[in-house]
């Protein structure tokens, strides 16, 4: 398949997905809720009316499964609070991103995609530690 055909297929699928999302949003506007059965590829990219959601739905947004990685009551944020003690500013942010993608490796996105994000943030951290901020 040529590059042009790949791009055409991508945009055709994207347009179809956007139409499905638009239809689901229109349905919610008309009936007050999303259709019972949304195609698996057309869940809206936003959370909607958070206050109208059940406690379970709100918890799934606030504490998604890809961060529920430890047994018991230990939460991802508990680990981050401990791991990032003594760091601040860009160093803490970059370390946090490295830890985030490391902990959820392959649980949310493609494993190679997550690994490349880890690599990118680690490279950016090294550059920051060696050279300081890019914008001074």
Image: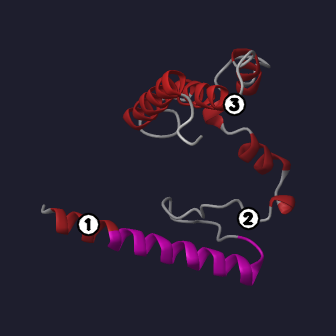
Residue ID at (71%, 76%): 28
Q: Percent x, y for residue 117?
A: 45, 35
The image quarter in which residue 62 lies: top right
Residue 38 higher or lower than 55, as above or below: below
The residue indicated by pointer 2 is 48
Say whether residue 86 is left or right of residue 98: right
Q: Residues within 10 Å of mark 2 (few under 14, many from 20)?
A: few
The residue closer to the viewer here, 6 or 56, is 6
* Residue 89: mark: 3
Residue ID at (75%, 16%): 85
The residue closer to the viewer here, 126 or 2, is 126
Say whether residue 4 is left or right of residue 122: left
Q: How many marks?
A: 3
Q: Nearer the viewer, mark 1 or mark 2?
A: 1
Q: Residues within 10 Å of mark 3 (few under 14, many from 20)?
A: few
The residue indicated by pointer 1 is 7
Q: Earlier in the sequence, mark 3 or mark 1?
A: 1
Q: Percent x, y for residue 20?
A: 51, 74
Q: Secondary structure at mark 1?
A: helix
Say whether residue 14 is left or right of residue 73: left
Residue 24 higher or lower than 101, as above or below: below
Residue ID at (72%, 25%): 88
Quarter in which the C terminus is drawn: top right
Residue ID at (68%, 39%): 64
Q: Earlier in the sequence, mark 1 or mark 2?
A: 1
Residue 89 higher or lower than 6, as above or below: above
Q: Secondary structure at mark 3?
A: helix
Range shown magenta: 11-33
Quarter in which the N terminus is drawn: bottom left
Q: Secondary structure at mark 2?
A: loop
């Amino acid at each position: 398949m040529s590059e042009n055909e790949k791009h055409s297929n991508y945009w055709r699928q994207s347009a179809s997905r956007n139409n499905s999302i638009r239809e689901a949003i229109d349905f919610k506007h008309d009936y007050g809720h999303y259709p019972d059965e949304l195609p698996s590829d057309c869940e809206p990219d936003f959370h909607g009316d958070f206050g109208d959601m059940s406690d379970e739905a709100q918890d799934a947004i606030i504490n998604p499964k890809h961060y529920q990685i430890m047994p018991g009551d230990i939460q991802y944020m508990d680990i981050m609070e401990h791991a990032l003690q003594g760091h601040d500013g860009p160093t803490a942010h970059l370390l946090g991103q490295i830890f985030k993608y490391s902990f959820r490796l392959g649980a949310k996105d493609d494993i190679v995609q997550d690994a490349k994000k880890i690599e990118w943030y680690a490279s950016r951290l090294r550059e920051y530690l060696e050279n300081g901020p890019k914008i001074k």
